Image (tube, rainbow, N blue to C red):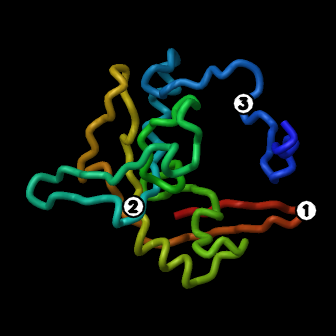
Amino acid sequence: DPGEAPPGALGIDEQAVVYGSDDRTEVGLHPDMLLREAADSVALIARSGDVRIDPSTGAVTLTTRTLTASSGLCPGERFANEPTVGFCTALLVGPARMVTAGHCLDGDHNGTVSDTERASFCRDANFVFDFQRGPSLALGTVTSDDVFRCHRVVVDSLNSAAVGVSDYAII
């Protein structure tokens, strides 16, 4: 069609993100029990405004959006209607330590993390465990016992230089 731009002309990357057959699955449906158990150590990081805890019952209400709404996925793509609430994930590596990507602290997306951004991250970040679908594909129940706050950023690094790339934070 003479009115259409050739692929790539609009700055859209035409390369596949998933190579080969798309065998992604919900964690709760994965056949490997060890993988399902390991997923219990992963928390999503959500902003305070997206996490409401009822003080009398401990029930948690999360403001969710679909991946289509939050990430611009086309409606027909796999997982397009999945609920999402967080902006990053973190891995529990000790009784009171999480590891995440350093860019999760980069509030103004300029490639560096300032003391102000570290403080802002800790004020606003909620670490939410058990936000996953079980074998029935229903979202699990999240309670106040599953939600933790950031006490402080222990160390972080965000360096995109050609040599010595680093992108981590220990919370």
- The kind of residue on which mark 2 rests is Asn
| Number of numbered discs overlaid on the protein picture | 3
User: Is residue 93 visible to the viewer in this orientation of the structure?
Assistant: no
Say which residue appears at 52% left-offset and 36% top-offset: 80
Quadrant where the image shows the N terminus:
top right
Question: How far across and how far down the image is residue 59, in percent?
Answer: 18, 50
User: Outermost residue, front direction?
Assistant: 2
Element marked by disc 3: loop
Is tag 3's residue or tag 2's residue first in the polypeptide sequence?
3
Q: Please name whichever residue, 1 or 67, is drawn nearer the observer in this view of the structure.
A: 1
Circles 3, 1 touching at the beta carbon (< 8 Å):
no
Please say if 52 is above or below 116. Answer: above
* Amino acid type shown at disc 3: Val
**Whole-percent x, y for residue 62 in the image:** 31, 52
In terms of sequence position, does the residue under pointer 3 or pointer 1 come before the other?
Answer: 3
User: Which numbered marker is on residue 163?
Assistant: 1
Amino acid type at mark 1: Val
Residue at 50%, 20% in the rendered image: 30
Mark 2: which secondary structure? strand
In the rendered image, which quarter is residue 125 located in?
bottom left
Label 3: how many Cα within 10 Å (few below 14, some 14–19, many 20+):
few
Which sits earlier in the primary sequence, circle 2 or circle 1? Answer: 2
The quarter of the picture where residue 52 lies is bottom left
Q: CA distance from mark 3 to mark 2?
A: 30 Å
Q: Are marks 2 and 1 in contact (CB under 8 Å)?
A: no
Residue named by callout 2:
126
Asked whether the viewer can see residue 113, the reply is: yes
